[in-house]
Image (cartoon, grey):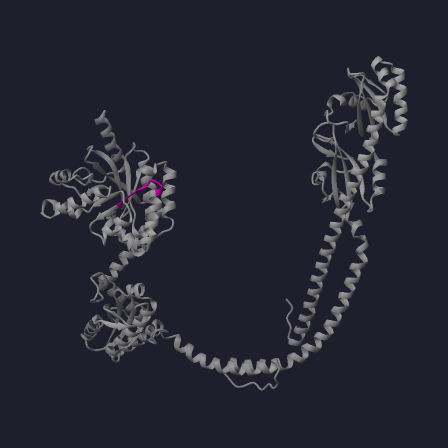
């Protein structure tokens, strides 16, 4: 790449280069247009020559046909053919050959005998021709030996067909030369024969002829440069032509008249380029001088000197100098603002996480000398997401600003910062042990009070986590992290409260993180497995389905309860690949069971948010060969909370495939009846809490009975979960429950035992 030390040199080179580029573009376009014009003309001339040939061919054919018909209708000739008078026939054929000029004349008798002199190959071809020729034709072009012949056939009738007159005129270089003379352009013509289904020519390779179309002109390569070529098939004795005419027009010949024009365009362009370069040098020098002054001023601004540049004039350079001075002023003002924004929150004006971290580190260093305590209070608003979702982000932003004011009014000399979202932090340096707790409690009490934001009355609340250094963290990062862990504990224990950091929280977080890492490894190495708990139909007392349940055998910890790892899987999103494994494995196992035994799989709300769920289920069915009617998808009402419309669309799409859909844990969710009205589930599963109470609570049986009556009214099946004793079973039978599931019948079992249970049923039935 060329480097220029002076702007004037660069501008001169640029202008000259641009003109040269423009010249090249013009030359390229001109060449393309000229070439396209020449090629179009060449194609038109070629197609015109082909039409001329067609007219000449028609004229010559008509002349030969007339001559053949004349001879065939001659009374004496017909009598000679009928009586087999060979001398008379030979004399008549000789006279005919002289009239047609350069051709051959034959008589083919009805038995195939040929009278007339010519090469053996031609005689053989002529003897077969009357019998090959289409009845609608009187003329054809055939190949015989090394030649191509124009054939005319006329029937000799006395009064029935006793033979045929056949004229054969060779097509050779003489005819092609005559055709070339008739053309307005220097084209070449040759006759092609057909062999092995391909056109053949002594001077052109057959492969090159394949690229030449029939009936229209096209660009081709026949071995001596680019040409426009056209193949005109000549009529054969049958449907397929045995010979063709090849016309070609060399592009070099077509371009020859335009060479002088191209040279003139090139010379004119070079002269214009020289003039442009001279003018560019003068113009570049006049522009470069004031720009050099602006360059020096810009270097001064780089060093922090925001002085003005002294360039006069009202043209573009003068206006540029004025704009430069305004820019320098604006840069100075923005530098101050950027320095502020780098360490402060744009929404509330409070210090941000960066500044808070720096101040915390400074406070910890100072506390190391003074012995004071450094407390970090992480304050997070409860249910702030609902404000954004219901009232909009504008109201949410206004609420954050108002909350910042409320907290700031109570923190006094403490540093208040916004860490992000709805989370604030307070840095408190104090020697009083109870001051962090007292301040946190004041903030909780104040934030519980209703506030009016943008005309909306909002009842808020907050949770607070507290860490006190240096005991809970010798650095800012560890102290803030531990305060955040305490905040999460406050959230988990009911919100609206405060919690101090304990070392157990850090250990718990580390254990949770390790379990997440182990879970990722488990997915990759196949540590998960499925067990199956049977569902017993109370109408037939037989197994009607199995519910697939996930188990994790940890390589060092042993079995881990789903209660422990499923929440972490949902929180981290790992439930999606785990759920895919469950669906695939459940379908594969169920495909080995006898029909119509079904398999039920549980799908979490997070899986329902994944756009890939529908495809995963369809793929699992396709790979396993399991009928869709034998798959049952179970979900809880939580899937409808965030996006009920999207969940309903997915449920309808699954149901349209024939997949059954069951509502699990019915009666424990948010608004069961509204979802039953919007979506017709195939089954209701009664939560085990109602079933367990049937032996203890007098109200439990009526509730279960009402649920079963609702299911029957809506045309849904029913399953009772957690059936563990005979009393519960008897009561469920009395109430008309469809099926049961629980330890009374069977605990969850491995696939082999599930198959054995089904096998036992078949043996019992037999």
Horizontal placement of 150 versus 487: left or right? Answer: right
Vertical placement of residue 212 versus 667, above or below: above
Residue drawn at (31%, 36%) of the image: 590
657 drawn magenta? yes
Q: Is residue 353 visible to us here?
A: yes
Q: Quadrant of residue 628?
A: top left
The quadrant of the rendering that contains the C terminus is top left
Q: Quadrant of residue 159?
A: top right
Horizontal placement of 612 versus 240: left or right? Answer: left
Horizontal placement of 305 versus 374: left or right? Answer: right
Which of these two is toward me, 419 or 617? Answer: 617
Vertical placement of residue 288 versus 671, above or below: below
Which of these two is toward me, 418 or 114? Answer: 114
Q: Tell me residue 217's x, y (percent).
A: 73, 44
Horizontal placement of 723 versus 302: left or right? Answer: left
Q: What's drawn in magenta, residue-wise? A: 656-662
Which of these two is toward me, 277 or 729? Answer: 729
Residue drawn at (89%, 21%) of the image: 92
Which of these two is toward me, 746 or 313? Answer: 313
């Amino acid at each position: 790449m060329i480097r220029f030390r002076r702007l004037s040199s660069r501008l001169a080179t640029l202008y000259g280069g641009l003109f040269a580029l423009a010249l090249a573009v013009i030359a390229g376009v001109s060449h393309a247009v000229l070439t396209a014009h020449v090629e179009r003309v060449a194609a038109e001339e070629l197609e015109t020559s082909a039409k001329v040939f067609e007219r000449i061919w028609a004229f010559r054919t008509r002349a030969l046909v007339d001559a053949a018909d004349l001879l065939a209708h001659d009374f004496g000739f017909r009598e000679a053919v009928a009586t087999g008078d060979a001398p008379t026939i030979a004399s008549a054929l000789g006279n005919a050959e002289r009239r047609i000029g350069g051709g051959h004349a034959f008589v083919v008798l009805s038995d195939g005998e040929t009278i007339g002199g010519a090469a053996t190959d031609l005689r053989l071809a002529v003897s077969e021709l009357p019998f090959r020729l289409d009845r609608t034709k009187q003329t054809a072009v055939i190949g015989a030996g090394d030649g191509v012949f124009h054939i005319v056939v006329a029937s000799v009738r006395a009064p029935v067909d006793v033979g045929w007159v056949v004229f054969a005129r060779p097509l050779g270089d003489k005819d092609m030369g005559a055709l070339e003379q008739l053309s307005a352009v220097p084209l070449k013509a040759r006759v092609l024969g057909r062999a092995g289904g391909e056109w053949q020519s002594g001077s052109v390779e057959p492969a090159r002829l394949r690229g030449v179309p029939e009936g229209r002109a096209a660009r081709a390569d026949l071995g001596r440069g680019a040409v426009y070529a056209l193949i005109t098939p000549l009529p054969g004795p049958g449907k397929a032509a045995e010979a063709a005419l090849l016309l070609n027009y060399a592009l070099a010949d077509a371009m020859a008249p335009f060479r002088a024009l191209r040279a003139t365009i090139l010379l004119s362009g070079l002269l214009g380029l020289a003039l442009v370069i001279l003018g560019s040098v003068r113009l570049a020098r006049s522009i470069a001088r004031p720009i050099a002054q602006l360059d020096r001023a810009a270097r001064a601004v780089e060093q922090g000197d925001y002085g003005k540049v002294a360039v006069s004039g009202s043209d573009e350079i003068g206006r540029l100098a004025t704009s430069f001075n305004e820019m320098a002023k604006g840069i100075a003002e923005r530098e101050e603002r950027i320095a502020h924004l780098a360490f402060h929150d744009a929404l509330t004006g409070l210090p941000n996480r960066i500044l808070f971290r720096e101040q915390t580190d400074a406070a910890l260093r100072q506390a190391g000398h003074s012995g004071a305590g450094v407390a970090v209070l992480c304050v997070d608003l409860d249910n702030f997401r609902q404000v954004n979702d219901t009232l909009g982000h504008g109201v949410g932003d206004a609420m954050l600003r108002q909350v910042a004011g409320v907290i700031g009014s109570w923190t006094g000399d403490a540093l208040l910062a916004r860490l992000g979202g709805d989370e604030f932090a307070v840095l408190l340096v104090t020697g009083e042990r109870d001051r962090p707790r007292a301040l946190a409690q004041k903030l909780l009490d104040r934030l519980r009070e209703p506030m009016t934001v943008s005309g909306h009355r909002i009842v808020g609340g907050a949770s607070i986590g507290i860490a006190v250094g240096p005991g809970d963290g010798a650095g800012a990062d560890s102290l803030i992290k531990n305060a955040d862990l305490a905040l999460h504990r406050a959230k988990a224990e009911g919100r609206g409260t405060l919690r101090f950091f304990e070392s157990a929280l850090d250990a718990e977080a580390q254990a949770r993180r390790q379990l997440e890492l182990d879970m990722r490894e488990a997915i990759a190495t196949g540590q998960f497995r499925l067990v199956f708990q049977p569902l017993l139909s109370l109408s037939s007392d037989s197994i009607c389905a199995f519910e697939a349940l996930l188990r994790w055998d940890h390589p060092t910890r042993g079995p881990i309860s789903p209660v422990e790892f499923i929440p972490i899987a949902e929180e981290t999103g790992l439930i999606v690949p785990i759920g895919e494994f469950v669906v695939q494995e459940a379908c594969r196992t169920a495909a080995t069971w006898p029909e119509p035994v079904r398999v039920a799989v549980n799908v979490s709300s997070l899986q329902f948010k994944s756009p890939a769920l529908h495809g995963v289920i369809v793929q699992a069915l396709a790979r396993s060969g399991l009928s869709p009617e034998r798959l049952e998808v179970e979900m809880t009402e939580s899937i409808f909370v965030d996006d009920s419309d999207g969940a309903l669309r997915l449920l309808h799409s699954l149901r349209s495939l024939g997949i059954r859909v069951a509502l699990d844990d019915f009666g424990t969710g948010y608004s069961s009846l509204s979802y039953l009205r919007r979506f017709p589930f195939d089954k209701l599963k009664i939560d085990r809490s109602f079933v367990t109470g049937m032996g203890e609570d007098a109200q439990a049986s009526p509730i279960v009975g009402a649920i079963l009556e609702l299911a029957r009214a809506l045309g849904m099946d029913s399953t009772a979960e957690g059936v563990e004793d005979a009393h519960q079973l008897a009561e469920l039978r009395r109430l008309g429950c469809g099926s049961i599931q629980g330890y009374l019948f069977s605990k969850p079992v491995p696939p082999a035992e599930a198959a054995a249970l089904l096998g036992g049923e078949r043996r019992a039935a037999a």
